[in-house]
Image (spheres, helix red, strand yellow):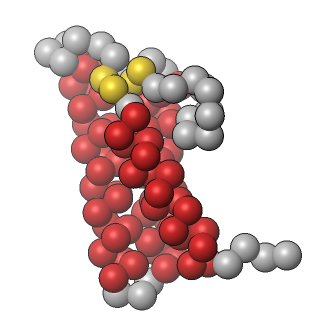
Amino acid sequence: MAADLGEKTDRYEGLLAEALDAAEIAPPPDSPMGEAAAECLEMASSYLEDGRHFRTNDDLVNALASFSYGHAWLDAGARVGLFDVPRDGHLFTV
């Protein structure tokens, strides 16, 4: 059975918002890795805003893509140690 686009978009928006709240920068903020982590957080946050903009304009395909890209920035950052994240649960693949 195919997933409903609206439901999936809602779910991915929630996951990204929750992941943004849960991710904490791991390296010292004034280090190159700390700066990279801050940039990843900014990208993820921007994709969340973009997705919400697309949703407001009834463009669910691009909204879903934005939420997915934003979460990918956080997931990749967590994987390489830029973020301290919960290791159990459904938010990250670490």
Judge from the rendering whether residue 23 lies leftward or rightward of residue 28; answer left or right.
right
Give residue 21's quadrant in the image. Answer: top left
The spot of residue 77 in percent (x, y) is 43, 30
Whole-percent x, y for residue 12 in the image: 53, 59
Q: The C terminus lies in which quarter of the figure?
A: top right
Residue 83, position in %: x, y? Answer: 39, 24
Across the whole image, how many numbered discs are drawn on residues? Answer: 0
Q: Is residue 89 left or right of residue 64?
A: right
Q: In this view, does 83 lie above or below 38?
A: above
Q: Residue at x 46, y 26 (%)?
A: 85
The answer to which of 40 and 20 lies nearer the viewer is 20
Q: Can residue 10 be seen in this view?
A: yes
| Residue at image location 49% in from the left, 79% down from the top | 60
Instruction: State the image quarter where residue 90 is shown.
Output: top right
Quarter of the rendering occupied by the N terminus: bottom right
Please tell me whether residue 28 is drawn above or below residue 25 in the rendered image.
above
From this viewpoint, which residue is outermost toward the right? 1
Q: Above or below — where is 20 with respect to 1?
A: above
Residue 69 visible to an observer of this rendering: no
- The residue furthest bottom is 58
Residue 58, percent across and down?
42, 87
Measured along the vertical axis of the image, is residue 76 above or below residue 66?
above
Report the front residue among 66 and 87.
87
Would you say 89 lies left or right of 61 here? Answer: right
